[in-house]
Every structure is written in C-alpha cells, then in structure tokens.
Amino acid sequence: MSSSKQLAVMALAAIVSGGAYAQFDGESRTDAQISAAVQKQIDERPELKSENISVRSAHGVVYLQGLVDTRVDQDEAAAIAASVPGVARVYNGLAVSGNG
C-alpha cells in the first residue's frame, strides 16, 4: 500500500474511532492522551488549584478554561500545556480572579 493510502487509512481510522491523533517524534497520541498528560502536569502544581482548570484537546490543540488566582498562574498553566509532547498550540482561556 502506498504511503498516501496508508495515511488516508490512518486518518479514517482516527475519525471512525472518535479520536484525533497528534504526531511528535514519530509517535502519535490521541487527544484524550494529550489532555490527560496536560491535566496531570497541572494537577502536580497545587498553587494552580487544578480543580478550577478544564483541559481539552482537539487535533493537538489544547484549550484551557477556568479560573486562576494570578496572571502568573495563567501563564504557568499555558507553559505547562505547551511543554507536553504532542501539543501543537495552546489556547489559554483561563480567567484571572485577582485573589492571589
């Protein structure tokens, strides 16, 4: 099978299975795996109050939503997300409460 046909089959399989894949270092991760990895990294930072942060991913793009105390926390959450393998881009929709 030609490489273009293999790619088409892989893309179709991803769509049918309901999971998009992101490529990094020759490997692929599902959006669920990317979201879980980002959430895990954020959970490891208690100052970010991860229960207030929602993470979702689509085609390697991570969307952060929720509420953090400071602009520094907002930037840190985005930096954490961007550092996870497979993340192509981060949209930081976190609001700052100003309580920090």
Image (tube, helix red, strand yellow):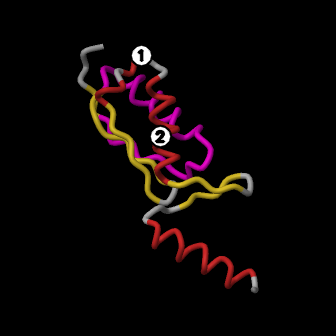
Q: Is residue 83 magenta?
A: yes
**Which residues are drawn in magenta?**
68-94
Q: Amino acid at mark 2?
A: Ala
Q: Secondary structure at mark 1?
A: helix
The crowd level at tag 1 (other Cα within 10 Å; few <14, some 14-19, many 20+) is: few
Residue 46 image point, x, y percent: 41, 16
Question: What residue lies at 64% left-to-right and 58% top-to-bottom?
Answer: 23
Question: What residue lies at 48% left-to-right and 53% top-to-bottom?
Answer: 31
**Residue nearest the observer in this picture, 78 or 32:** 32
The quarter of the picture where residue 98 lies is top left
Query: From what the image shows, is residue 14 above or below residue 44?
Result: below
Q: Label 2, on which residue? A: 36
Q: Quadrant of the N terminus?
A: bottom right
Question: What residue lies at 44% left-to-right and 57% top-to-bottom?
Answer: 58
> Looking at this rendering, what residue extends furthest in the front direction?
17
Q: Label 1, on which residue? A: 46
The quarter of the picture where residue 66 lies is top left
Query: From what the image shows, is residue 54 above or below residue 88?
Result: above
Q: Nearer the viewer, mark 1 or mark 2?
A: 2
**Residue nearest the observer in this picture, 16 or 89:** 16
Q: Earlier in the sequence, mark 1 or mark 2?
A: 2
Q: Is residue 76 magenta?
A: yes
Whether residues under marks 1 and 2 lie with C-beta atoms below 8 angstroms apart, the answer is: no
Query: From what the image shows, is residue 10 above or below residue 80?
Result: below
Q: Amino acid at mark 1?
A: Pro
Residue 51 image point, x, y percent: 31, 26
